[in-house]
């Protein structure tokens, strides 16, 4: 078992009342799964992904990741944990504009203190695999959306994470680019990477082997 | 990792060229100015620091209790020092020093030089190392002279001076000396300056031989080196019996006149001033008061400017950070820790600061010559350079970089991951820091501007003040030639008779203002009048003195050539008349110099015969045409001012072909006396201009960012019908409020400083609130202009454009 959420609650106060962003969410994810989270805007998809990615806090409940209880960990340990095991892919790519493709992909390795020679080999492999060797010296603004997302995924994969969290990874792409990205996710999943994606699109959701429906922060039966 | 940081830093700087350039320009200018001002201040603070014995070197002075209060006197009498060394324990070495302008004649060369008449200990007390010749007590042999390297070269050129002879004329007496030592040239920060050193007893008999045992003629300074372990306090206390013995009459006179003894019950106290404080000591108010305010003020201005530039940097970095939020968020999700982010952003700051420091250093080096001219200082980098100063600079640099670069870095590294990823940031708290910093910035600018106004007004006031004599038409010429002064005066009178534009000629033994010879002196004496001690400044004058200078007589008459008895006549000023407390001062006779009785024949209206920051003191003018006069005064016709100087120079050349002509109009001489004020004014003016420019750079940058941040708001407001003017006003008021708060804080401070400074001047301008309002208005106007560049453009833009970007 990769991770387990038990009765997670997250709320904000608005005019003295609690507005629930996540309402009693329980979820168990096994290694090698490909999960799609579906729901309309504001249903809590991104919040759930952020909680799983340890970027966001929650008020109640328990979260275990690889036998570590995340809710009791300090920020520093948590950051170590997600640095090691989780890769993020965002709708808006979030590449660093001032760095080239090569440097963007390299960055996570820098924060993991990987040796220079090893870094070179890893990044070269990744560029090769995604067929973007020719683009390695370009800046993000010189790439198409699909290519940027490709770089984003390459960056997420470079540190060999167990889990990829993808928040509307195809939201800014046209349908053809989107399809390619989803195909890529499927291949990655077949190689053993666990993937959790949030999406609007039924078609994209179908790539997953399990679909979770959210509405107003609660799980619903589809 | 490091390479990655450097890369991203450079790319960021390149991307935001406007900001990088504004930052770099602001910071490097500030660094350059701070370095120059620092150099100046350290130079000024390093006077006399080069003497190795400084810890035990002291200048001797004394204070006396008088009915008017405590009065100090630096000059000492010839027998004083030998007696002091003999009778009071604790002195290791001592020397008398009398500096004199002398005429040096060697071969056909005739040079005006400054001589130091010193005791043999002089060269072992002070660090004026002998390079060649006799090394210990080089002046001990009465027939020898010690030259500085510079002087030796002036006199003998490239040839070796050792063993050569030269003649020295001092106060009319000529003597032959052999050069037996050459000393190294001393640093510019030496308060004792000389070209040649001679034994103390080689002075003219007037200054030495004839007063060898006279305790009342005080004409030179005294320095001592205390024995190890003796504190100046112990020494001062030990001088009591010495004072009792040698100044018995003075003590009795003080007691009789009703002076209050000091807390130890003494009427006269011999005191020591640490030698290193000598250049900063003021003896005007009794016990020596060491004042280093001026250099510290300059240092302060340097720091203020650096502060303003740093505030700009901080504000710009924080404001700009909104553009980098996504990067911060992303780096955090990729696993960057707080420390890593902090060092990344701090590193970027160090980058800019290092660049600015290098550029600033280069600027300072490039402008150091103009700086030296502008502020007429001899300060150089070499003069103040030492490992300590260098380390100090590095330390200051590090601290500034740590704070100015570290503060924004700290803020950025602490941001929440999700928040920054979304690009949303609640800036309210940080705006307060920015606002406070900007308030301080403008406060400083207003403070400096008001300081500038006050300084120039006071200088203008002093320059235009009626000093009680004619300074526009009168030329003063220092009598620095070989002939006797009376002879020169006679020749001048004869030769100038033929020229109608020369109206009057006279002479005196003291200058008015500061002449081109750069020397000024004070002579004061006290005598008993009707059982009281009376003190007065004394001046020896030639005939026609009041007439030449257009001085007003309030009673009596001036000196007249037809009255033989006028050789014992004196003129006094109103202050002196008041001190004599006579109903009719013209009837007064007083006895000076033992038995000679002088008649008061006239009372002059008070005129400023000293520096303008002092009030007019009692003065007595003696008619001594044959005395050692030092200055000739020549009044020229009103419209002939331009041609008079060349004419006089020509005539002077005929009389004294080998002596430089140093004549100048008195108004120039008066201007020269407030050189210090002018220098301070130039410095503060440049400081305030720079402060305003730097503040405006910061304001401009902030306005750029604010306008960018509020683009959408401006668009919405325009869509719902706000006019361009309304929006411009809305954008400007926020900034103007800050200037207003800065004004409110700065004015009381400026008032306080100006008030205190003006207290040092006997007559000064009255502070007017309008000075400060003008300073505030100037700052406000400049601020308004600066921001209007952007605000008006933003306000007049088509709202559709700004809304479309959402």
Image: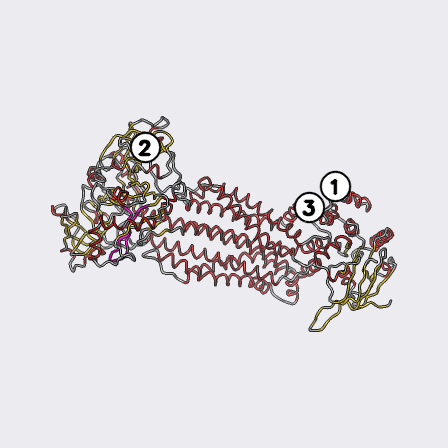
Choose top left, top right, bottom left or bottom right for residue B434. Answer: bottom right
B730 over B320 or under it: above or below:
below
- Magenta-drawn stretch contains B71: yes
Q: Which residue occupies 78% across, 68% down?
A: A23
Which numbered mark, 3 or 2, is in the foreground of this view?
2
Q: Chain of mark 2?
A: B
Closer to us: A202 or B534 = B534
Which is nearer the eye, B684 or A191?
A: A191
Q: Which residues are magenta?
A: B59-75
For label 2, the SS is loop
Q: Which residue is mark 3?
A: B1
How many residues crowd around disc 1 within 10 Å: few (fewer than 14), some, or many (20 or more)? few
Q: Determine the main secondary structure of the stretch shown in magenta.
A: strand
Q: Chain of mark 3?
A: B
Quadrant, the C terminus of chain B = bottom right
Residue B583, image x, y percentages: 16, 60
Which mark is drawn over residue A117?
1
The lab-note entry on whether marks 1 and 2 share a chain reads: no
Distance of label 3 from label 2 (alpha carbons): 67 Å
Q: Which mark is residue B388?
A: none
Q: CA distance from mark 3 to mark 1?
A: 13 Å
Q: Is residue B364 above or below residue B149?
A: below
In this rendering, the label closer to the viewer, 1 or 2: 2
Q: Mark 2 sits on what residue?
A: B138
The mark that comes first in sequence, 3 or 2, is 3
Q: Position of residue B142 (x, y in %)?
A: 26, 32
Chain letter of the residue beneath label 1 in the structure image? A
């Amino acid at each position: 078992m990769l991770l387990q959420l038990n009765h997670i609650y997250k709320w904000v106060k608005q005019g003295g009342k609690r507005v629930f962003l996540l309402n009693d969410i329980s979820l168990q994810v096994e290694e090698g799964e490909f999960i799609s989270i579906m729901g309309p805007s504001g249903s809590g998809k991104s919040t759930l992904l952020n909680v799983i990615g340890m970027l966001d806090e929650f008020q109640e409940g328990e979260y275990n990741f690889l036998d570590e209880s995340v809710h009791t960990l300090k920020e520093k340990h948590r950051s170590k944990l997600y640095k090691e095991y989780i890769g993020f892919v965002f709708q808006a790519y979030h590449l660093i504009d001032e760095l080239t493709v090569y440097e963007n992909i390299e960055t996570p390795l820098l924060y993991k203190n990987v040796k220079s020679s090893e870094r070179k080999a890893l990044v070269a492999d990744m560029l090769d695999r995604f067929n973007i060797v020719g683009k390695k010296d370009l800046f993000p603004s010189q790439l198409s959306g699909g290519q940027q997302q490709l770089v984003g995924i390459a960056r997420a994969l470079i540190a060999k994470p167990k889990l990829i969290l993808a928040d509307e990874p195809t939201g800014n792409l046209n349908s053809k680019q989107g399809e390619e990205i989803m195909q890529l996710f499927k291949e990655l999943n077949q190689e053993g990477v666990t993937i959790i994606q949030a999406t609007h699109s039924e078609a994209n959701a179908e790539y997953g082997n399990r679909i979770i429906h959210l509405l107003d922060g609660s799980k619903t039966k589809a | 990792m490091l390479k990655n940081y450097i890369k991203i830093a450079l790319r960021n700087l390149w991307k935001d060229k406007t900001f990088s350039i504004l930052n770099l320009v602001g910071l490097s200018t500030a660094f350059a100015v701070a370095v120059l001002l620092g150099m100046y201040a350290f130079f000024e603070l390093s006077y006399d620091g080069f003497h190795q014995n400084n810890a035990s070197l002291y200048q001797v002075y004394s204070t006396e209790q008088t009915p008017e209060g405590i009065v100090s006197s630096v000059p000492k009498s010839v027998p004083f020092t030998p007696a002091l060394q003999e009778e009071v324990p604790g002195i290791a070495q001592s020397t008398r020093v009398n500096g004199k302008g002398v005429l040096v004649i060697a071969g056909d060369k005739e040079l005006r030089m400054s001589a130091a008449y010193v005791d043999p200990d002089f060269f072992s007390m002070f660090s004026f190392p002998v390079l060649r010749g006799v090394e210990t007590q080089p002046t001990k042999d009465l027939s020898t002279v010690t030259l500085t390297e510079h002087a030796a070269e002036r006199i003998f050129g490239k040839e070796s001076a050792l063993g050569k002879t030269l003649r020295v004329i001092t106060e009319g007496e000529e003597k032959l000396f052999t050069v037996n030592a050459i000393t190294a040239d001393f640093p510019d920060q030496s308060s004792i300056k000389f070209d040649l050193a001679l034994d103390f007893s080689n002075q003219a008999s007037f200054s030495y031989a004839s007063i060898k045992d006279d305790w009342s003629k005080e004409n030179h300074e005294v320095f001592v080196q205390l024995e190890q372990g003796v504190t100046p306090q112990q020494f001062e206390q030990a001088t009591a019996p010495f004072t009792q013995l040698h100044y018995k009459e003075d003590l009795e006179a003080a007691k009789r006149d009703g002076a209050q003894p000091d807390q130890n019950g003494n009427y006269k106290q011999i005191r020591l001033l640490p030698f290193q404080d000598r250049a900063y000591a003021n003896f005007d108010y009794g016990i020596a008061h060491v004042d280093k305010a001026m250099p510290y003020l300059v240092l302060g201005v340097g720091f203020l400017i650096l502060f303003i530039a740093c505030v700009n940097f901080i504000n710009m970095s924080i404001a700009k950070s909104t553009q980098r939020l996504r990067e911060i968020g992303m780096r955090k999700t990729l696993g960057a820790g707080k420390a890593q982010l902090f060092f990344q952003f701090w590193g970027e700051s160090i980058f800019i600061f290092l660049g600015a420091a290098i550029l600033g250093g280069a600027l300072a080096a490039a402008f150091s010559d103009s700086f030296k001219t502008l502020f007429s200082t001899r300060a150089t980098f070499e003069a103040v350079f030492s490992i300590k100063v260098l380390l100090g600079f590095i330390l200051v640099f590090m601290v500034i970089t740590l704070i100015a670069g570290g503060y924004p870095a700290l803020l950025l590294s602490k941001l929440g991951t999700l928040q920054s990823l979304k690009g949303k940031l609640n800036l309210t708290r940080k705006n307060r820091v920015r606002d406070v910093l900007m308030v301080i910035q403008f406060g400083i600018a207003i403070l400096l501007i008001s300081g500038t106004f006050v300084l120039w007004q006071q200088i203008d006031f002093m320059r235009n003040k009626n000093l009680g004599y004619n300074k526009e038409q009168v030329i003063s010429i220092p009598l620095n030639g070989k002939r006797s002064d009376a002879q020169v005066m006679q020749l001048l009178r004869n030769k100038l008779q033929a020229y109608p534009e020369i109206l009057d000629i006279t002479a005196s033994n003291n200058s008015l203002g500061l002449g081109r010879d750069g020397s000024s002196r004070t002579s004061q004496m006290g005598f008993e009048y009707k059982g009281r001690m009376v003190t007065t400044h004394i001046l020896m004058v030639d005939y026609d003195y009041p007439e030449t200078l257009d001085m007003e007589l309030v009673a009596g008459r001036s000196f007249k050539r037809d009255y033989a008895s006028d050789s014992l006549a004196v003129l006094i000023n109103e202050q002196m008349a008041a001190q004599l407390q006579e109903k009719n001062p013209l009837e007064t006779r007083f006895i000076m110099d033992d038995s000679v009785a002088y008649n008061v024949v006239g009372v002059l209206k008070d005129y400023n015969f000293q520096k303008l920051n002092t009030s007019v003191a009692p003065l007595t003018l003696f008619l001594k045409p044959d005395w050692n006069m030092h200055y000739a005064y020549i009044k020229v016709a009103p419209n002939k001012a331009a041609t008079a100087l060349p004419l006089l120079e020509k005539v002077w050349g005929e009389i004294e072909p080998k002596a430089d002509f140093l004549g100048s109009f008195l108004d120039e001489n008066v201007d020269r006396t407030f050189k210090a004020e002018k220098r301070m004014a130039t410095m503060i003016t440049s400081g305030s201009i720079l402060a305003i420019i730097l503040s405006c750079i910061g304001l401009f940058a902030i306005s750029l960012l604010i306008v960018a941040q509020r683009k959408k708001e401006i668009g919405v407001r325009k869509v719902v019908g706000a006019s361009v003017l309304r929006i411009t006003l809305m954008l400007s008021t926020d900034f103007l409020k800050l200037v207003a708060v800065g004004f409110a804080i700065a004015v009381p401070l400026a008032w306080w400083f100006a008030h205190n400074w003006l207290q040092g001047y006997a007559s000064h301008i009255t502070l007017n609130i309008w000075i400060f309002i003008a300073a505030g208005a100037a700052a406000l106007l400049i601020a308004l202009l600066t921001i209007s560049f952007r605000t008006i453009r933003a306000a007049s833009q088509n709202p559709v454009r700004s809304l479309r970007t959402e």
